[in-house]
Amino acid sequence: MKDTNLKDRKKDHIDLAFDSQIDHRRLDNRFFYEPLFSSHPSDRPAFEFTLAGKDLKSPFWVSSMTGGTEKAGMINRNLAKACAKYQMGMGLGSCRILLDTPESLPDFDLRPILGDKVPFFANIGIAQLEDALNKNHMDRWLELIHRLTADGLIVHINPLQEWMQPEGDRITAPPVETISRLLDEFPLPVIVKEVGQGMGKASLDALLRLPLEAIDFAANGGTNFTLVELLRSDAAKKDVFEGLTRIGHSAEEMVGLSNDLLKQNKDKYLTKNLIISGGVKGFLDGYYLHEKSLFPALIGQASALLKRALVSFEDLDEYLDNQHRGWALCQNYLALKNEVK
């Protein structure tokens, strides 16, 4: 077939050649690029994953974002449409509002959009979970989950956020004890998630010993909800406590810690899955961390999806389509330099 655009394309190559020089100091040295062994991939990556008994075809997970705002309904519906299209799992933003204002349920009632194939989780903060357990109110949360036709519950571990929040609740028991109490009586899958600073080795070790569906890192490097609350506080409080927001663990460090723990304690761990999130800027970061992990893992994103879901479904869909295409290219042409599997 005659290439009718050949002259224009070659002119573009000449015009853009000098603008396309790559500084060697900016090279991504995490991968070997191997262009000889694969044809072009399809638009979707070859990916299968089971979470809460449901099969996913996407490596990406919609990490829980803030809920209870006037825009929550539009944001959630756009995210749910994307999850249905790409067979991608989703964690809801804050569901606390639904207990006090049940009329907000339509903003969170996403199962009709999601369909039955993808996992869908409600969420609760650790302070609110402690309160519900102490007051024997977990039946209210079970009723809410059943109304949402959700598959389980995400518990947010956020002691620093609650401490800095002007309206924050106080945590009176170690979170690991509260989570253990929940697991003793709760009949549905549970995911535990941090809120922007990640977790250290001892915390990961303690959680991995529990029968959780997954641990969601929410590592340092993405949105930090301790800092969000300090920005909502007075300037004097921010000046005193801001240093705490710079303490935490990156997603790459947490993958390394999880790998080390698994090698040492493989037979002691009941949690089998990770959701790697926090500072994951796109498919390259996600693919690198996924391939580095010894645990089966999904890649969680929040702010990148929220930014586009606020605009339109079309904007979100275009972003996710390119993320999945990028992942497929990685599978065909990239190999980790420091292979761990």
Image (cartoon, grey):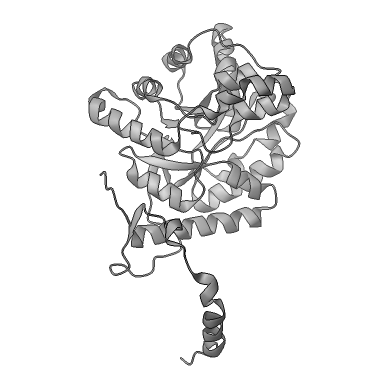
Residue 112, image x and y in percent?
60, 43
> In the image, is residue 323 above or below residue 183?
below
Residue 213, image x and y in percent?
41, 30
Q: Nearer the viewer, residue 217 or 315?
A: 217
Taking the image as drawn, is residue 34 in sight? yes
Q: Nearer the viewer, residue 54 or 43?
A: 43
Residue 270, image x and y in percent?
32, 25
> In the image, is residue 249 above or below residue 40?
above
View extreme (bottom): residue: 2
Q: Is residue 77 left or right of residue 45?
A: right
Q: So how many labels did they put on this image?
A: 0
> In the image, is residue 27 above or below residue 225?
below
Question: Which residue appears at 45% of the width and 31% of the height?
Answer: 249
Quadrant where the C terminus sits is top left
Taking the image as drawn, is residue 58 in sight? no
Question: Which residue appears at 57% of the width and 56% of the height?
Answer: 319
Q: In this view, does 285 lie to the left or right of 334?
A: right
Residue 145, image x and y in percent?
57, 27
Question: Which residue appears at 65% of the width and 23% of the height?
Answer: 96
Question: Which residue appears at 57% of the width and 50% of the height?
Answer: 82
> In the image, is residue 47 above or below residue 273?
below
